[in-house]
Amino acid sequence: MSNIPEDGDPNCVNQAPAPTNGKFRSRRLHLFGLDSDDIVRAFFGGNATIAIIVLGLIIFFLFREGAGFFGQNGAELNLYRKSGLEYADYMRVQTDAFFDLSKYLTSIESEELTTLVKKDGLPFREAKERTAALHTFTDDLRMSIGPMKALMDKQVAEAIAIRNDFKLHPDSAELIARRTALLASRDEFHRLNEDLRTHVSAVLANLPEADKRFARRIEKFRGMAENYISASRRTDRALDAWNPDKPVHFFARLTSFLFGRNWITNSYYQDWYGVLPLLYGSVLVSVIALFFAVPFGIAGAIYVNQFASVWEQRLIKPYIEFISAIPSVVIGFFGVIVWGQFVRDASHWEILSWIPGFPISERLNAFTAGTLLAIMAIPTIFTLAEDALNNVPKAFTEASYAVGATKLQTTSRIIVPTAMSGMISAVLLGFGRVIGETMVVLLCAGNRIEMPPLSDGLAACFKPVHTMTGIVAQEMGEVVPGSTHYRALFLVGTLLFFISLAINYVAQKILRRYSISER
Amino acid sequence: MENRTGKGTFRHNPKSWSHRRERIVLASLRLMTYFVIFCAAFLFLDIIVKGTPTVFSTHFPFVNVEFLTGSPETLHVFEWNGSHIELADNDFRTWAAANGVDAATFKDATYAYSGGGILPAILGTILLVAGSMVIALFLGILSAIYLSEYARDTAFIRMIRLSIVNLAGVPSIVFGLFGMGMFVLFFGWGVSLLAGWFTLAFMVLPIVITASEASLRAVPKGFREGALALGATKWQTIRTNVLPYAMPGILTSSILSIARVAGETAPIMFTAAYAMRDKMPWQVDSLWGFFQQGVMALPYHIYVVSSKIPQNDYTARMQYGTALVFMILVTAITMLSIFMRQKARKKYRW
């Protein structure tokens, strides 16, 4: 009974007094001065560090693959500028803006025509005569872009050719000469731009009196046209200030990823890796999911914890825990086959026609994915919120009853406020689960890289979106390792990783700081 | 409002506003809870009802043997002598040879992935789960023993705990990216079982550690003190007086993480899963080849058949069949864990 190893463990109640003369040794095997117990301990300790190691490795590998993005993308952006493609792009954007404008006017015309024929019952010819004035304007506007479009097409084709040659022969003098030739068209472009501006102003001044029903759209057209004119002036200035040899600033590389509104890959023109539409999609889908999951999860937890009978508790709790065991891919599959179809069919019902955006044409959209994600988030929120309610000290409840409060009063004024921190962290953890979920959004969110404008209100929820998790899952299998696209996907993963870490951290912090229930 | 009745007891007035409000709130809470239950039940029933015809049959042996033992094949559908015939690719070739039809030029409707069965996917899932759980349990239980039996509250241990908590919140797709970056590309293992095992193992590690630690802590202190008092060393104490009692709890909680491993798709998408593989997992050249092979997996198969091929009645059969088999597998694992938990509770009471 003399070989109890020296061990400061507080559990060890009968510690032997430490040997004083240094001769005391256990009779068991020693290696490097450690007895077998120490070795076992060290072995276990080594294993315990695995969590740190894994977390470190994840960060390391995400950075290792992702960090190269900024360099590679910067080089591509530099090439984009050096070859004059950026210059041609200004022209392209300006021309596209003009097309949008003219398309909008055409759409007003065709809508007016349809309304006259269908609603007012006019014969087609008469309706045509009534819109004739507008028609000459739209035609005129459409035709006036011709010379500019021709110039732009030529410029863009030349710029792409120069870009592709620059890749093969960097800094070749011949290519720089070609680029200079490209820039010589600047004056012609300015002249055409000026012409168009006068043209649009003339159109605005002489816009024919339209039907009152379309006054709002005409008004919107006016706004668009004015925007176009100021944008056109800005383009002129940008073209003048444009300098092909100025390298792309490092900050611009960062912002082109974080705040870029385009995610365009494998394009003939120029690849853009802007994460904003993906982040927007992820957040939109998560918000829809939480909108449904939070009330149902919390209500379920309060009901089961406070009001349910014993047999209800025994059934509902395992049942909801069991929901969390449904694999996400099965829920996504259900969404593709059943739920998405149902949402689209339901959107055609008369009673639901008051909802903005109905009827919808896409069965897979943010709403489909969000509602299915809600089913996945409910068990998380339910279980954690129920735990929080359970941890409220009995004394609180009893005190409340003792002063004559009813069950509902006790629940709403004592128990729920006490458990609030736990419930908030439950919601946050549910959010973390939802934003990191892959399969449901990959299958059901529609996977279209767009940002449905929030100004559409509720209708934006019924548009297809793409998400950060979805894009990684969708495109990772097809990219060449080491390419800019590949690195961009790792960067999206890194962003996702840090978002989920932040959510987790805040949830833990809230749980610890504000919980009364632990004592 | 409470009324004091003549006998000196509190009683709610059933007509009072407070009482009515309580009933309304209670009813709406109950309605919301049951609505969630209903939604999930609808999902289960839909898969069960539509999947049953594919997986089970009305006569002996009551399961669709071809579906459970075949590989996915292209389905050929055609009219022949006035009868409607549906044949999987291999059967179709046999049939074509027997009837003197040229299989290559024969006009028929073909549906990818809609014939045959899903055996490779079932086996692949089982292999992935088995391998990753061995790794996760080994690392997880050892970590948990250290954390619950040896560790003191130092800064380092707090850091470990913080890592575990944060690791649990990392999205599964990020684990997939990590597995691809580290195992598939950096270690050069390629899309393989081995890469999938480690990726999945690291993903469930936090769950295993947390669950195991809770089970270890549930063993009463007296057990340890008794052993130490008799002169056992720390390790002897753990081995004889702690682990045997904690083991049922550890295993039970670990089974829940098996359900998670079996259900995840994102981590294996780029690390271990193939959309289609004809060979069975044991048809490999060498032992190393076994670890190096990619496998089919049920969740990935569901993803492939529900997103990569056009929807029609023939593919829907396959989809629902696969989903039902998958659900049965996951349900069985979960039920097993619940059952074992109850048994363990009865066996060890202190």
Image (cartoon, rainbow, N blue to C red):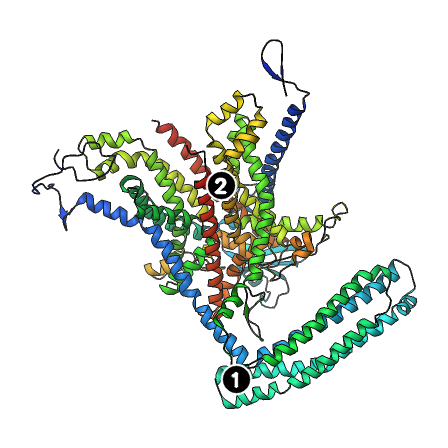
| Quarter assignment of residue B114 | bottom right
Q: Amino acid at mark 2?
A: Thr
**Local secondary structure at mark 1:** helix
| Residue in front for this viewpoint, B118 or B228 | B228
- Residue A463: give x, y in percent of width and height: 65, 56
- Mark yes or no: residue A315 visible: no
Q: Which residue is mark 2?
A: B331
**Local secondary structure at mark 2:** helix
Residue B153 left/right relative to A293:
left
Q: Is residue B25 above or below residue A121?
A: above
Mark identifier at residue B83:
none
Q: Is residue B79 above or below residue A269?
A: above
Residue B226 left/right relative to A259:
left
- Residue A125: give x, y in percent of width and height: 91, 68
Q: CA distance from mark 1 to mark 2?
A: 59 Å
| Residue in front for this viewpoint, A112 or A469 | A112
Q: Which residue is mark 1?
A: A165
Q: Residues within 10 Å of mark 1 (few under 14, many from 20)?
A: some
The residue depicted at 58 percent of the width and 75 percent of the height is A269
Q: Nearer the viewer, mark 1 or mark 2?
A: 1
Q: Is residue A390 above or below residue B327?
A: above
Residue B103 left/right relative to B262:
right
The residue depicted at 55 percent of the width and 71 percent of the height is A271
The residue depicted at 54 percent of the width and 45 percent of the height is A376
Spot the residue most to the top: B7
- Residue B44: give x, y in percent of width and height: 57, 41
Q: Is residue A35 above or below residue A219?
A: above
- Mark yes or no: residue B184 visible: yes
